[in-house]
Amino acid sequence: MPTVQKQPGARAAILLVDRKAGKSFSGTIWDTEKDLQNSEAAVAGIRKDIASKAGAPGPKVEALEILYTEIPAAVVSR
């Protein structure tokens, strides 16, 4: 998380876990697609390292557009 937080345009990170199924999903939210693209060099190695430590195959990476989100005012005024 600290590496992501340092990247320009980083807004949020989430981690979802299904312990019974042994599955997880992590995602980040960025101000712009360009911010996401610019973060890739900083986070690619971390992504692989976390997957390795968890005993998971190489991470599957997809970029998706958020069509709707509600962000509380306290988060927006960082």
Image (cartoon, rainbow, N blue to C red):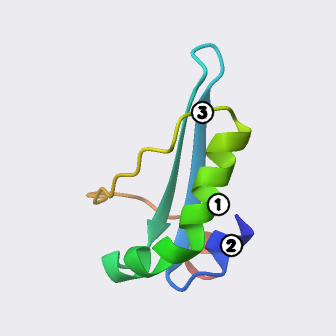
Q: Which of 8 and 55 is in front in this view?
A: 55
Residue for point 60% across, 45% down: 15
Name the secondary structure under disc 3: loop
Which numbered disc, 3 or 1, marks the residue that appears first in the sequence? 1
> In the image, is residue 66 above or below residue 31?
above
Real-space CA distance between mark 3 and mark 2, rounded to the nearest whole angstrom: 21 Å
Q: In this view, does 59 lie above or below 6?
A: above
Q: Quadrant of the N terminus?
A: bottom right
Tell me which amino acid carries mark 2: Thr
Left or right for 24, reference 61: right
Q: Residues within 10 Å of mark 1 (few under 14, many from 20)?
A: some
Based on the displayed image, in which of its 4 quarters is residue 24 positioned?
top right
**What residue is shown with label 3?**
56
Does dot 2 land on a helix, a strand or a loop?
helix
User: Relative to 41, is 23 above or below?
Assistant: above
Give the labeled residue for mark 2: 3
- Tell me how far mark 2 sits from mark 1, CA to CA: 9 Å
Name the residue type under label 3: Ala
- Residue 67 seen in the current view: yes
Q: Nearer the viewer, residue 57 or 10?
A: 57
Q: Which residue lies furthest to the bottom in this view?
A: 8
Which x, y percent locates residue 32? 35, 79
Q: Mark 1 belongs to which amino acid?
A: Ile
Image coords of residue 20 (percent x, y): 63, 13
Residue 43 is left or right of residue 37, and the answer is: right
Q: 10 Å neighbourhood of mark 3: few (<14), some, or many (≥20)? A: few
Please identify the quarter of the rendering in which residue 17 is found: top right
Q: In this view, does 30 lie above or below 53?
A: below
Compare residues 28 and 39 and report the one nearer the observer: 39
Snapshot quadrant of residue 13: bottom right
The residue labelled by disc 1 is 46
